[in-house]
Image (cartoon, rainbow, N blue to C red):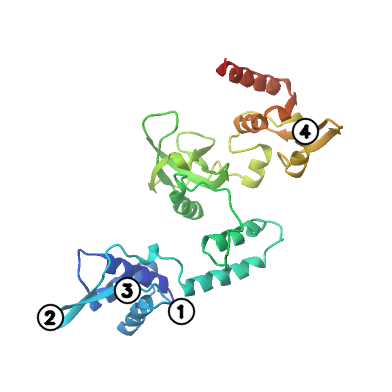
Amino acid sequence: MSTNKHAIIRYQTLDKCFSNKGKRYYIEDLLEACNTALYNFDSTSNGIKKRQLYDDIKFMESEQGWSIPLEKVKDGRRAFYRYEDETFSINNQPLNDAEADQLKSAMLVLTRFKGLPQFEWVNELIPKLDKTFNLYAKDQEIISFDTNQFLIGTEFITPLFKAIQNKQTLLIEYKSFKSEISQHIVFHAYHLKQYNNRWFLFGKHNDYNNLTNLALDRVQSIEQSSENFDESQLVDFDEYFDDFIGVTKPINTEITKVILNATAELAPYIITKPLHGSQRKVNVSENSFTFSIDVIPNYELKKLLLSFGNAITVLEPLFLRNEIVEILNKNINNYN
């Protein structure tokens, strides 16, 4: 595989040219398209010559590349290039050998960070890449991940990530669950967070002076805005999420000590997988495990506690206990 700078840009450009049935691309046209793409990416680029272009095409046709079904159509003394199969694209093909080797090399670099503080995600990422790109010799599936392949909005993660990096203000078309029509929001994006297999974008809504979050599965479209980026609500998100569970932080609500009682059967699960980083043991007996967490009570906390059914009981504070009782009574009424 060519190791020349920006090779992947040339391959992607050629792929688009070969797929375009509305225009005939002669060798000069392919060269111009590649050099234009290179210049648009890097204005200091001097482009490539025909020899490099022929090498690129040869690589794309090879088994080490993508084995593209390229057709060279005679047109007088000249010839133009196109795919024999109109539906073909290198983006629809599995990893080729060269790409797999590059990915394996990248994974080897990542393994150096395993076990280091702040790099716990590497432990999950490496086997996930192995599974997704079939980089291991598999006779059977050896690992599964909790994902939702039908989740809407994940296509926005990359452009939103770049917008946060570049401090680019966005115009977002957003349709909440509570509205039948979408609205256009000027939004200053600060942070992306995944919770319960959904993605959320945190930032400042132009109409409000507080931190806001948007669910990505309710985003209809995004585009760049010319307004200046507003960092007035930017916070340390590591500290921000320490105080509560999930993504909802009620305004003007303080951290509360929540005391809970778990059954003896549930206790081992709660001990090995704490509900929150602040979890502390209060009392242990043969029949139960009493513990506390220091959090801001919110919607996600109540949903989490209710998910354990009768295996967890709220002891304190009284207002949270009463709210849980009210929800449970409504549940019972639903079955009457």
Assess whether mark 2 and mark 1 are in contact (beta carbons under 8 angstroms): no
Pick the front one: 249 or 208: 249
Query: Which label was assigned to residue 76?
Result: 2
State how far apart marks 4 and 3 are (Cα).
Answer: 63 Å
Query: Which label was assigned to residue 3?
Result: 1
State how far apart marks 4 and 2 are (Cα).
Answer: 82 Å
Q: Position of residue 72 (x, y in %)?
A: 23, 77
Residue at disc 3, secondary structure? helix
From the image, tell me which residue sits under label 4: 292
Q: Position of residue 305 (x, y in %)?
A: 67, 31
Judged by depth in the image, the label closer to the viewer, 3 or 1, is 1
Estimate how packed mark 1 is, as few (under 14), some (14 to 19) or many (20 or more) residues with alpha carbons within 10 Å.
Answer: few
- Residue 70 visible: yes
Could you tell me which quadrant the N terminus lies in? bottom left
Estimate how packed mark 2 is, as few (under 14), some (14 to 19) or many (20 or more) residues with alpha carbons within 10 Å.
Answer: few
From the image, tell me which residue sits under label 3: 35
**Amino acid bearing label 2:** Gly
Assess whether mark 3 and mark 2 are in contact (beta carbons under 8 angstroms): no
Q: Position of residue 221 (x, y in %)?
A: 38, 44
Assess whether mark 1 and mark 4 are in contact (beta carbons under 8 angstroms): no
Estimate how packed mark 4 is, as few (under 14), some (14 to 19) or many (20 or more) residues with alpha carbons within 10 Å.
Answer: many
Q: Earlier in the sequence, mark 3 or mark 1?
A: 1
Pick the front one: 114 or 233: 114
